[in-house]
Image (cartoon, rainbow, N blue to C red):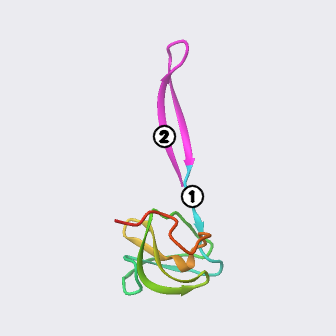
Amino acid sequence: MAVERIENTESSDGEAVSMTATAAQVTYPIAPGYAVNVRSGPGTSYRIVRVLPEGSRVSISCQRPGDSVSGPYGTTSIWDNIANGEYISDAYVKTGSDGYIAPRCS
């Protein structure tokens, strides 16, 4: 997924020109061989809202503490917010860190 910003400028001959700058959003891979439950909150007692298929990548908007979960990347109580009202355990996401890599969710 990319974020686009459009800027309107004026060329040297006075003509209006639109320029688009695209910034790539950082995504992280889900552990190979796993389909991951996406939950409505940071814990296993929250309802499953969908399932990420094997090979998925996610962007993390913020992180918060929740239930402790053991997975392929260790045991953690960090939950990643991947969309509004959608959380997955960080134990299934290869972030390259055992700690927080995004701001805490408010």
Q: Quadrant of residue 79?
A: bottom left
Residue 71, compared with residue 97, is above or below; it is below
Q: Which residues are magenta?
A: 1-23
Residue lying at 57% horizontally and 75% vertically, measured from the top left: 98
How many other residues sit within 10 Å of disc 1, few (<14), some (14-19) or many (≥20)? Answer: few
Q: Amino acid at mark 1?
A: Val
Residue 50 coordinates in the image, percent (x, y): 45, 76
Q: Quadrant of the C terminus?
A: bottom left
Residue 41 coordinates in the image, percent (x, y): 37, 77
Q: Considering the whole magenta stretch, tell me its main secondary structure.
A: strand
Q: Which mark is residue 56?
A: none
Q: Secondary structure at mark 2?
A: strand
Extreme residue toward the top, this view: 13
Residue 76 coordinates in the image, percent (x, y): 51, 82
Which sits earlier in the primary sequence, circle 1 or circle 2?
Answer: 2
Q: Amino acid at mark 2?
A: Arg
Residue lying at 54% horizontally and 18% vertically, measured from the top left: 11
Number of numbered discs: 2
Residue 9 within the segment the image draws in magenta: yes
Q: How many angstroms separate mark 1 from mark 2 (CA)?
A: 17 Å
Question: Which of the pair 11/71 is nearer the observer?
Answer: 71
Question: Which of the pair 8/61 is nearer the observer?
Answer: 61
Check if mark 1's residue and mark 2's residue have beta carbons within 8 Å. Answer: no
Residue lying at 48% horizontally and 40% vertically, measured from the top left: 5
Q: Quadrant of the N terminus?
A: bottom right
Query: What residue is shown with label 1?
Result: 26
Query: What residue is shown with label 2?
Result: 5
